[in-house]
Amino acid sequence: MNVFVAFFNSTVVAVVATALALVVCSMMAYALARLPFRGSAVVLAAIVLMMLVPTEVILVPLFKQFAALGLLNTYGALIIPHVVSLFGVVLLRQFIANLPVELTEAAKIDGANAWQNYRYIVLPLIRPGLATLGILVSSRRGTTSCGRSSPPPPRACRRSRSRSSRSDPLTGTANTGWSWRPRSSPSPRRCSSSSSPSDSSSRASATPV
């Protein structure tokens, strides 16, 4: 495997996934902290409850979904699962909730809308939280590979069943049950050591008395 290609792929996925996660999570956190709407507490409670679900529970369904969409072995399958981080939403929401409300209210009095408040007031003040979330997302991205299928073996393998009770001379264990063995080229046929009666009579006649 080419090391430079693997390094380039890892760098692209890490940078894109981290950038998208920072944008999406910060927007969701700003909406939960500074934009009051009906059901915001329910949404926050649902996010916290979904954090209790382990990743291993959704790993197989996520892999099957990517396989059905044809996204296996693509950048999208490695980036999409890390775009939304539930922990990142809760983390940034707490950062924004601890900011003084007077800052955003003063910006509203000056004519700033919600986007301008988010872009020019909130984002510069939560840079420590964004840096923390970026480190967490980039480090977590390197430990999961749900969108990557297993590479094919270097040689074709066949499934053979061995029922012989002979022991292995190296390990001393019996070769029983199912085992995976690489295919090998067929061995050449050996010539039979038995000779016909005509060949033996001819050799006997040729021997001097």
Image (cartoon, rainbow, N blue to C red):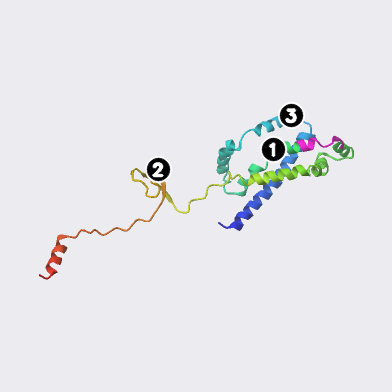
Residue plotted at (47% across, 54% down): 154
Residue 120 percent location from the top left of the image: 83, 44
Residue plotted at (57% across, 58% down): 2
Magenta stretch contains residue 129: no
**Which residue does the numbered mark 2 point to in the structure image?**
178
- Residue type at mark 2 is Trp
- Residue type at mark 1 is Phe
Secondary-structure class at tag 1: helix
Kindly give the residue lying farthest to the left in the view shown.
Answer: 209
Cα distance, mark 2 to mark 3?
55 Å
Proximity of marks 2 and 3: CB atoms separated by less than 8 Å: no
Tag on residue 87?
Answer: 1
Residue plotted at (55% across, 39% down): 60
Residue 3 percent location from the top left of the image: 59, 57
**Which residue does the numbered mark 3 point to in the structure image?**
41
Q: Earlier in the sequence, mark 1 or mark 2?
A: 1
